[in-house]
Image (spheres, rainbow, N blue to C red):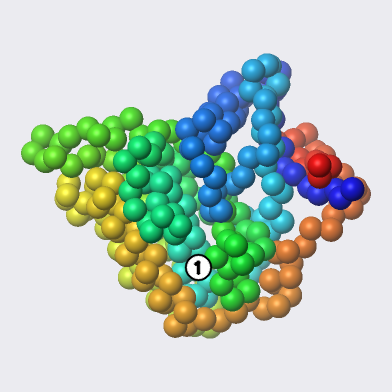
Amino acid sequence: MTLHLVAVKFSQSQEICASRAEEQLRNEIYVLTQVLPEKHERIVEVLGFHSTSSIKWLTTRFISGGDVETFASMHPDCLTTAFICHIAVQMVEALAFLVSGATNDNGMIVRDDWPCTVHGDIHLGNMLLRPATDGTGGFSNFPDVVLADFGCAKQDQLTGSKLADSKDEYLPGAVFDSWRLAAELVMLCENSLAHDEAGGVFPITEKLSGVQYSGPARVNRQGLLAVHRAVISMAKEKRQGCLVPLPSEVAASIAFNDVSDGDLEMMFCRPENSARMPKRRKRL
């Protein structure tokens, strides 16, 4: 029998600000288990949930590398052009999946029956790092980047709405997700201490953020996915062309998951951290 860690979010009605936390948790469970019809390697994976009583909980795989915001503060010298482009590739893949159902397996095309989904809270703290595998598009010794925290997510209710002078859909939420991702990537560039200029990322962020200024013909799902595909292609080319692998000790720290009970007590068993408390789970 093998034990492994899972992350648990839960809410109780007695907690301060419980109504908002409970609403967001209920929404996250709904979006991840009911709205999205498939799993994706760039989206946090749900293992179990309960949402029909006063105590609601959601379990996901414990992701050992922490979030990009913390990683950037601890390792600003690792924020190379290649690594920031890697984050761009994988997070744009996540957004393309949410908006269009596009995946590498289906040739990155729009699925007409797909529920256009908006994350609504794109920031570095919601991008988690985990060790890459061959099955998840690993590159060099870079970790996978996984989009988490869907408490503000929603299905874009304006999908299919028509502009007065156009036959195109209007997707303000989906466009804003892309704009926010571009802004977060720019922030990483500004915080970089890497020896190779992280400013090489700026053409990619300009392409990604420019979608909201490109006129109505660019904000339907076909147009937005075209931008996503172009950004992924640009970022992959730049990532390959200026590759600087992570230092071996940094890459190893992302994969670290041998956590003792004492470590869990110290790191997670404080009341303010209850929503992120990992549990040991038996593998069936």
- Occupied quadrant, residue 120: top left
- Examine the rendering and report whether any part of residue 202 can be seen: no
Residue 279 is situated, as x and y percent measured from the top left of the image, at 80, 41
Label 1: how many Cα within 10 Å (few below 14, some 14–19, many 20+): many
Please give the name of the residue rendered at 87% of the width and 44% of the height, measured from the top-left corner: 265
- Occupied quadrant, residue 144: bottom right
Tag count: 1
Q: Secondary structure at mark 1?
A: helix
Residue 230 is situated, as x and y percent measured from the top left of the image, at 32, 65
Residue 142 is situated, as x and y percent measured from the top left of the image, at 60, 70
- Occupied quadrant, residue 65: bottom right
- Examine the rendering and report whether any part of residue 219 can be seen: yes
Q: Identify the residue position indicated by label 1 in the image.
A: 86
> Residue flagged by tag 1: what amino acid is it?
His
Q: Nearer the viewer, residue 99 or 183?
A: 99
Q: Is residue 129 left or right of residue 101?
A: right
Which residue is most to the front? 106
Q: Nearer the viewer, residue 107 or 276?
A: 107
* Figure quadrant of the C terminus: top right
Please give the name of the residue rendered at 76% of the width and 40% of the height, measured from the top-left corner: 277
Vertical order, 77 against 150 (above or below): below
Vertical order, 15 against 139 (above or below): above
Residue 39 is situated, as x and y percent measured from the top left of the image, at 54, 45
Q: Nearer the viewer, residue 4 or 148?
A: 4
